[in-house]
Image (tube, rainbow, N blue to C red):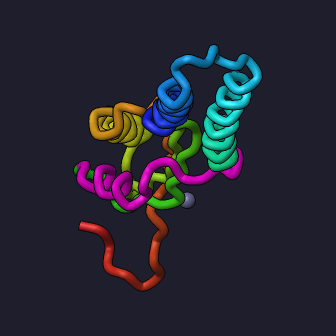
Amino acid sequence: MKSKLLLGSGAVLVAALIFLAAAPEKKPDPAEAARLNNLGCAYMNQQLFEKGLKNFQDAAVLDPARVIEVARGVEGVRDVHRVRSRGVHHAVELDLHLQVGSEMSVRSAHALAREIEAQLRVKFPELSDVVIHIEPCPVVVGAAAPV
Ligand SMILES: [Zn+2]
């Protein structure tokens, strides 16, 4: 994003230099300078609009598969689903559902969630907020008891 804004600023500067090089004896025309400036600003506004539109659409900022991979790597996690992220690239809000064994205590489940959050924050330093919803792993009728 910054590079595109720099490109827009650079385009204005290059256009101004070309204009001055083509007619060095001519005094810069304020109207022409204003047109060049408007052109650069229009480009930058378009880039900002596209970026804002992406955020407005609540597009996933983090790849859910990468988040799940980190979370599933923590011992005690049965499953992770409904991973959602939103925000801007330097301030991402993340929430997910964490399934744990139904026999796990609230204290242990909370500690597990904190460990997952800590590991996610290391892996994704752009995280500004993490919400983990803890739920018991569904019991399958007829399945063997968990070991
Ligand atoms: Zn769920």
> Does residue 98 show up?
yes
State the residue at coordinates (28%, 34%): 122
Q: Which residues are magenta?
A: 56-74
> Does residue 91 show up?
no
Relative side of 53 to 122, left or right: right
Compared with 23, 30 (above or below) is above
Which sits in the foreground, 4 or 77?
4
Check the image and name the residue furthest to the right: 31
- Classify residue 79 by image quadrant: bottom left
User: Residue 117 appears at what percent x and percent y?
Assistant: 37, 36
User: Residue 86 appears at what percent x and percent y?
Assistant: 57, 44
State the residue at coordinates (44%, 62%): 137
Which sits in the foreground, 113 or 95?
95
Which sits in the foreground, 84 or 77?
84
User: Residue 100 appears at what percent x and percent y?
Assistant: 39, 54
Compared with 57, 91 (above or below) is above
